[in-house]
Image (cartoon, grey):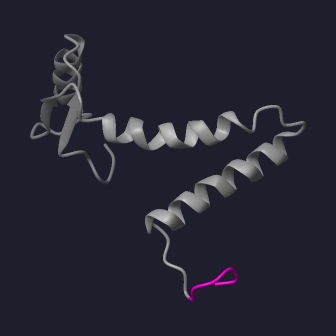
Amino acid sequence: MSDYPPETITTDRLASYPKTIRRLQSEGLLPKNVEHRTSKYLNNIIEADHGALKRVIRLTRGFQRMETAYATLKGFEVTRMIRRGHCILPRPGLKG
């Protein structure tokens, strides 16, 4: 079991999810007190977040080398994190 087990699991209404969660709990791989929630739209936040990134990536297809693609995508991610306030820079500005 991980150091930080989930408190809730949110899935869509697929019938196999409750059975799987009960099985994991009976095998001791998931705590008994985990709440299973079903929601059609709760993961839309995640999907919407990565949709903006997909629009940017679509423009950059056709890299010659994997290193170039990796560096470009890493730059996109860092830029988005800074804009959203997920990074705290020691000093404002480009070099900070």
- Residue 33, given in percent of the width and then of the height, sits at 9, 40
Quadrant in the rendering for residue 62: top right
Q: Is residue 36 above or below residue 92?
A: above
Q: How many marks?
A: 0
Q: Is residue 91 above or below residue 71?
A: below
Left or right relative to 73: residue 48: left
- Residue 60, given in percent of the width and then of the height, sits at 75, 39
Left or right relative to 32: residue 95: right
Tell me if residue 69 is in the magenta stretch: no
Left or right relative to 45: residue 18: left
Front-lying residue, 17 or 60: 60
Q: Residue at x 45, y 66 (%)?
A: 86
Front-lying residue, 34 or 73: 73
Which residue is most to the top? 15
Quadrant in the rendering for residue 1: top left
Q: Residue at x 19, y 17 (%)?
A: 13
Left or right relative to 41: residue 83: right
| Dominant secondary structure, magenta | loop
Q: Residue at x 84, y 37 (%)?
A: 63
Front-lying residue, 52 or 5: 52
- Residue 5, given in percent of the width and then of the height, sits at 26, 47
Q: Residue at x 60, y 61 (%)?
A: 78
Q: Is residue 5 above or below residue 88?
A: above
- Residue 48, given in percent of the width and then of the height, sits at 40, 39
Q: What segment carries the magenta color?
A: 91-96
Which residue is most to the right? 64
Which residue is most to the bottom? 91
Q: Quadrant of the C terminus?
A: bottom right
